Image (spheres, rainbow, N blue to C red):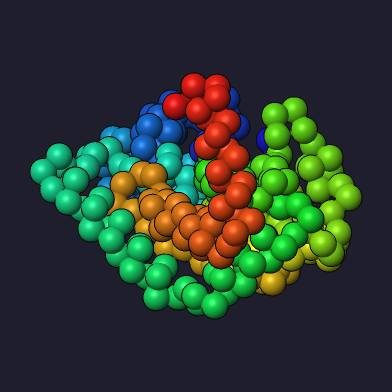
Amino acid sequence: MDRKPRDSLVARVRGALSELHPSERRLADVVLSFPGDIASYTATELAQLANVSNATVSRFVRKIGYGSFEEARQAVRAEQRAGAPLFRFGSGGAPLEGAVAAHLEQSRLNLDRTAAALDAAEVDALAEAALAARRVRVGGFRAGQPMARYLGWQLQQVIPDVTVFPRDGETLAEGLTALGPDDCVIVVALRRAPALLPEAVAAAHDSGAALALIGDLPGLDALPARWRFGCATSAPGPLLNHVAVMAVCNLIAARAIELSGAEGRRRMSVIEEGHARLGEL
């Protein structure tokens, strides 16, 4: 079976299982159980863990399409940088002692790094553009979707026409159709996004809409947009830490509300009257 260059290590191992000898199969079982460990193991250490020879490790990595064990290790490290949870924890697990402090400290560091790169004038420029737009579209994929929903929900307090895309059952084309220079689009672009994200961003940009990107996506600066807000998402555990992403969304929404003036207050007043009438809160 051919191994595609873009296949993950796990996909390659699973695709080769029927071709493996018993000793190689033992090695495959170890790799599939904790693929992230390969990033820190030597070939000898992995051989000892699986109770196989170094030669078996060399045959194994060639059978799954890598030129060497080091090439396989680099592929795993790339998966870790991309944010794949399966590759971000190992067989040892994280110790309970200090785990909470480590996560809180990383959240603080991510917030500090993100804030240091923020331009307050750009935040206000985006908020003003959203307030002046004919309609606002907020997009997000995978982990970015709930954050896009949060941002869209908060902006809706002072902006009448806010839609989060893609909505359930909706294609991207349906969500992006009819955008124009009078519109504003905000996309939460996080790592491990669908492959079509760059094309979706390009389509929104080509419409002439005021476009902003928020996130940690590698190459964020290379995507076409009027504003880009990079976020630090480093984490001590298997999941990327998105505290700073949420903080940026909160900041943008708060500034839009604060800058909305009398018109925004009127809309919020009407919403509160609706809450009272319906007894929702």
Q: In this view, does 153 lie to the left or right of 182?
A: left
Q: Position of residue 131 (x, y in %)?
A: 67, 60
What is the residue that sits farthest to the top in this orientation? 279
Q: Where is residue 220 in the image (x, y as percent from the top left)?
A: 61, 66
The quadrant of the rendering that contains the C terminus is top left
Q: Which residue is drawn at 55% across and 43% down?
A: 269
Q: Position of residue 12 (x, y in %)?
A: 57, 39
Q: Which residue is drawn at 49% across and 58% down?
A: 254
Q: Can residue 44 be seen in this view?
A: no
Q: Is residue 118 left or right of residue 125?
A: left
Q: Residue at x 49, y 23 (%)?
A: 280
Q: Is residue 166 visible?
A: yes
Q: Is residue 158 left or right of residue 173?
A: left
Q: Position of residue 61 (x, y in %)?
A: 50, 46
Up-down: is 208 above or below 199?
below
Q: Residue at x 35, y 63 (%)?
A: 111
